[in-house]
Image (cartoon, rainbow, N blue to C red):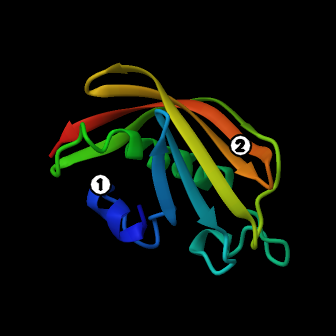
Amino acid sequence: MDRKDLEKILPHRPPMLLLDQAELRDGEARASYLVRGDEFFLQGHFPGHPVVPGVILCEMMAQACCVLLQNEMSASATPYYTGIQQVKFREKVQPGDALEIRCSLSNRKPPFYFAKGTVFVSGKTAAEGTFSFAVLEE
């Protein structure tokens, strides 16, 4: 699915829509994002040496995880983070990097969902962690 399709299942809109495309494969969400260099989160982080903030990488994983729930969320539902655990940042992410994001659900107790996510850069793990969120009807 492309950005237009993602907008049908995610409440995020530019500049906070942080995935270029996504798909479901073997029970796993696989998404991608190309860091162009003009993103709002790179302004001032860090001048002359831009690096994608870790919290943005966490948000990318969460958005990818929502792709897993596309058939379980109604059009009026919104996913909210409820926790982020065991997050590690292993590689810098900079302009020009093509990211691959993979997420899978580890448990579900609706409205709560628990997931594991990983962000890859050039085949190397850049960030990983586990997180939880609630899908609430508005």
Left or right: where does residue 4 sit relative to residue 77? right
Left or right: where does residue 137 sit relative to residue 31? left
Q: Which of marks 1 and 2 is nearer the N terminus?
A: 1
Which residue corresponds to mark 2? 127
Check if mark 1's residue and mark 2's residue have beta carbons within 8 Å: no
Confirm whether residue 126 shows in the render: yes
Quadrant, the N terminus: bottom left
Q: Residue at x 17, y 51 (%)?
A: 75
Q: Where is residue 25 in the image (x, y as percent from the top left)?
A: 49, 41
Which one is in front in this view, the residue at disc 1 or the one at disc 2?
Answer: 1
Q: Position of residue 43 (x, y in %)?
A: 67, 76
Of all residues shown, which one is farthest toward the bottom? 38
Q: Residue at x 22, y 38 (%)?
A: 136
Say what secondary structure mark 2 lies in. Answer: strand
Q: In which quarter of the image is residue 128?
A: top right
Q: Position of residue 73 (x, y in %)?
A: 23, 41
Which residue corresponds to mark 1? 9
Question: In the figure, 93 relative to 111: above or below?
Answer: below
> For mark 2, does the 10 Å Cα neighbourhood hold few (<14), some (14 to 19), or many (20 or more) residues?
many
Please tell me which residue lies in front, 116 or 71.
Answer: 71
